[in-house]
Image (cartoon, helix red, strand yellow):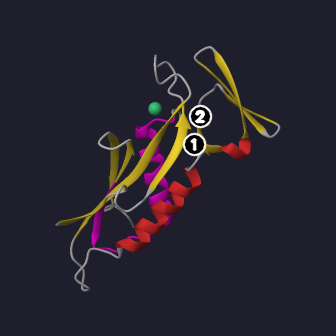
Amino acid sequence: MMRLEINGWSSKITFSATHIIPGHYKCGRLHGHDYAINATVFGNIGPEGVIMDFISVKEFLRKIAAELDHKVLIPMRDTGVKRKGGSIQYSTNGKEYMFPEEDCALLDVGVASAEELANFVLGRVREKVHFPESVTRVEIGVDEGEGQGAWTGIDLDARG
Ligand SMILES: [Zn+2]
């Protein structure tokens, strides 16, 4: 078993975005981070001497990063989020925000935390990236600033 690592910072799979973490004293206020998306692919070396062509994974992760770049990250599963015409109304922490929808990334998550972003990215990767048989596990890490991140992963053994 081997491991292929993609470092989002050195591979420039980064984005800057704004979020709010409800119920947090400091993070409950609108603020931003520089984020990086990291990935680790576990597997066996195939006939070409590699686990897989990881350029395609990098390119796909860059596409997701570009989608989120310079956006307000909106957790669509938060009951405080409402669509109003071309705007997103977000009621949280006893405050009300209104953002133009075009400035927002509408995410199918409950909280726009690094943890949930990692799950969101992993979901997209599972949906869209083809992994060869040699790959047994994929992990995605989302860093909020360097050296502070959340990781999630999934075993691919059970795929049909
Ligand atoms: Zn934050």
Foreground of the two, 43 or 15? 15
Answer with mark 1 or mark 2, whichever residue precedes in sequence.
Answer: 2
**Residue 89: horizontal and vertical position, in percent?**
72, 29
Label 1 belongs to which residue? Answer: 108
Q: Quadrant of the C terminus?
A: bottom left
* Picture residue at 45% right of the left edge, 44% below the top: 34
The picture quadrant where one finds residue 94 is top right
Q: Amino acid at mark 1?
A: Asp
Neighbor class of circle 2 (other Cα within 10 Å; few <14, some 14-19, many 20+) is some
Q: Is residue 160 visible?
A: yes
Q: Quadrant of the N terminus?
A: bottom left
Q: Which residues are magenta?
A: 112-139
**Count of marks overlaid on the render:** 2
Position of 5 with respect to 68 (left or right) is left
Q: Amino acid at mark 2?
A: Arg
User: Which residue ends up furthest to the top in the rendered image?
Assistant: 94
**Residue 145: horizontal and vertical position, in percent?**
38, 41
